[in-house]
Image (cartoon, grey):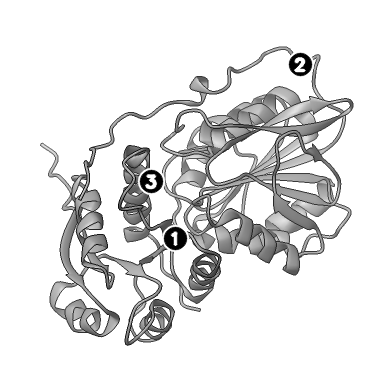
Amino acid sequence: MNKKTPPFKVLIIDDSAVVRQTLTHIYSSDSDLEVVGAAQDALIALRKLEELKPDVLSLDVQMPRMDGLTFLERLMKSNPMPVVMVSALTTKGSEEALRSLELGAVDIVEKPKLDVKEGLEEISIQICDKIKAAAQARVKTPRQRFFTPTKKFSVDEILPAKTNSSTKGQESIIAIGASTGGTVALREVLIPLPEDMPGIVIVQHMPKAFTPSFSESLDRECQLTVHEAREGEPVERGKVLISPGDQHMMLKPNGDGYSVSMSSGELVNRHRPSVDVLFRSVANVAGAKATGVILTGMGDDGAKGLAEMHGTGSHTFAQDEESCVVYGMPRAAFESGGVDEVLNPEQIVRRLIELR
């Protein structure tokens, strides 16, 4: 008889008592998580770390006495451990949350709205999944009704697979999927790429409030043009389209090339956007003209879609275990038989340039 794995221990750090209570309810709705304590500021949290020995921290960005970013920076220098930043939906909050990823946070989540019940089940699913993924991550230095989420929809709920290859496009395209740790991996892949690359479409599991800021930060650093995708937007050479954080993104034929369309359908593999949805659409529309890349992340989102791309003749790459923060999605893709090459980000860059 298999012994059940103990739940991951979570320490919540937030100056709002209501938020601490709300997050405690959300985390406690998942049997794989145990809230071992809560602290109203970073200084209290520092005293509790040694006593409680949590597996992961849920950390507010804006707090009195010591703000979340200062605490995070000090923690990563003295005692690196998995941290998920919980940020308000403001421009300043988005910028600070993205800065936290540079300082070593594993992921970011939207702070739940305390007066809104609509969509709470989906929010609970996504927050708990990010906390669990972070608890297993390889850390690298530099009052409402709550639900227990169980349903897991497949890509078939959003987009059926096609077998007809006569409608495949003529333009080359690159599709990339990433989750936990993906913001760093995407920078490592995109920044070195020259501006004459084929069009690139990306799904990064990220709250909707943060994808615009993330896209803008990449645009400032890359030779390629990067922005959040819009409904019906054409995919063009030298341009990177990142799916909005609350929409599935799909590739559609557009003459000899492609455009993207959005869907607010069910969560697929507990995500919206889903990598599987993007990859299946690329397999349906682009076939052998496409290259698929799956990067670090927990779970198996993208494994089925990458295998479908592989089956239509696409080149397919997976990030190697050594360079991943969480070797979940790449492992699942490799085990599905849909990966041509397992590479680190630098090697992925070289291969993408060779294939352009």
Above or below 8: residue 96: below
Marks 2 and 1, how far apart at CA: 39 Å
Task: Spot the residue most to the front.
Answer: 115
Image x and y of residue 79, in percent: 33, 81
Image x and y of residue 224, in percent: 80, 58
Which of the two discs, 2 and 1, labels the residue nearer the N terminus? 1
Image x and y of residue 110, in percent: 42, 56
Q: Which mark is residue 165?
A: 2
Query: In the rendered image, which quarter is residue 225 located in?
Result: bottom right
Marks 2 and 1 close (CB-CB < 8 Å) = no
Q: Tag 3: Cα neighbours inside 10 Å, few (<14), some, or many (≥20)? A: many
According to the image, label 1 marks what residue? 108
According to the image, label 3 marks what residue? 126
Where disc 2 sits, the SS reads: loop
Above or below 117: residue 321: below
Disc number lying in front (2 or 1): 1
Closer to the camera in the image, 308 or 116:
116
Amino acid on which disc 3 is placed: Gln
Label tally? 3
Which of the two discs, 1 and 3, labels the residue nearer the N terminus? 1
Q: Is residue 266 visible?
A: yes
Q: Which mark is residue 19?
A: none
Which of the two discs, 2 and 3, labels the residue nearer the N terminus? 3
Amino acid on which disc 1 is placed: Ile
Q: Residue at x 46, y 60 (%)?
A: 325
Image x and y of residue 252, in percent: 74, 27
Amino acid on which disc 2 is placed: Ser
